[in-house]
Amino acid sequence: MAVSLELVKELRARTGAGMMDCKGALEEAGGDLDRAIELLRKRGLAQAAKRAGRAATQGLVDAYIHGGGTLGVLVEVNCETDFVARTDEFRQLVRDLALQIAARDPRYVRREDVPEAELEREREIARAQLAQQLQGKPPAAVERAVEGKLGKWLEEVVLLEQPFIRDESKKVRDRIAEVVARTGENIVVRRFARFKLGEAGE
């Protein structure tokens, strides 16, 4: 189906995708703008992983202070270009991440940052907690239950694994992937610090 240039431009403005991608999505969606957006998002999110290896050296450091100065967060989020760093969408993502850190108090950015010794300690705690209810179960079932409990713990302490505070149907990493899809750039949470009045530093 032939689609108008105006429709292609509107889709491009709403998604940030390339002209040919927009044209192709509209043709596939039979001119339905919402369906074309969904198609682009699906493709974009699939491409987010491919962008993960690209250097991200631009970005923003943002600060969020809450509760009359009793809680503060500093977060650094990187992207590939200064152009994307200045966009409202990127700035909103960084602000959302600062709010997430303030509200959910993660300890690590990603799973890979959790020390192996701490993971093993949490596995042992999970085994001890599950010992009675899993008595007599096959070892494979016990390990599955332990890994399930470990996964729940990681959702609490790892920023990218946490449910996103503005939409708990997705994780923080999904929210970032959406912005990656729309900007076409790799986006990396580099580091963060959370300060609560009266808490001892590590």
Image: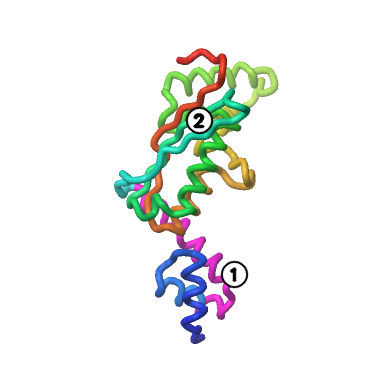
Q: Residue at x 48, y 53 (%)?
A: 88
- Residue placed farthest to the bottom in the image? 2
- Name the kind of residue labelled 2 in the image: Val
Which mark, by number, is residue 185?
Answer: none
User: Residue 38 colored magenta?
Assistant: yes
Residue under label 2: 73
Q: Main secondary structure of the magenta part?
A: helix
At x 48%, y 34%, the residue is 63
Question: Tag 1's secondary structure?
Answer: helix
- Left or right of residue 189: residue 14: right
User: Which residue in the protein does label 1 denote?
Assistant: 34
Classify residue 34 as left or right of residue 78.
Answer: right
Count of numbered tags: 2
Number of the front mark, 2 or 1: 2
User: How far from the left and from the top, in percent, is residue 114?
Assistant: 44, 27
Q: Residue at x 36, y 55 (%)?
A: 83
Mark 1 nearby-residue class (10 Å; few <14, some 14–19, many ≥20): few
Q: Which residues are magenta?
A: 27-52
In the displayed structure, 163 sits above or below 28; it is: above
> Residue 62's spot in the image, x, y percent?
45, 38
Quarter of the image containing the C terminus? top left
Residue placed farthest to the front in the image? 68
Reply yes or no: does residue 60 show up in magenta: no
Q: Could you give the CA–CA distance between mark 2 and mark 1, rounded to whole angstroms?
A: 36 Å
How packed mark 2 is, by other alpha carbons closer than 10 Å (few <14, some 14-19, many 20 or more), is: many
Question: Label 1 sits on what residue type?
Answer: Asp
**Residue 66 visible in the shown view:** yes
Q: Nearer the viewer, residue 97 or 62?
A: 62
Q: Quadrant of residue 116?
A: top left
Which residue is at the front of the view, 191 or 63?
63
Asked whether the viewer can see residue 140, the reply is no
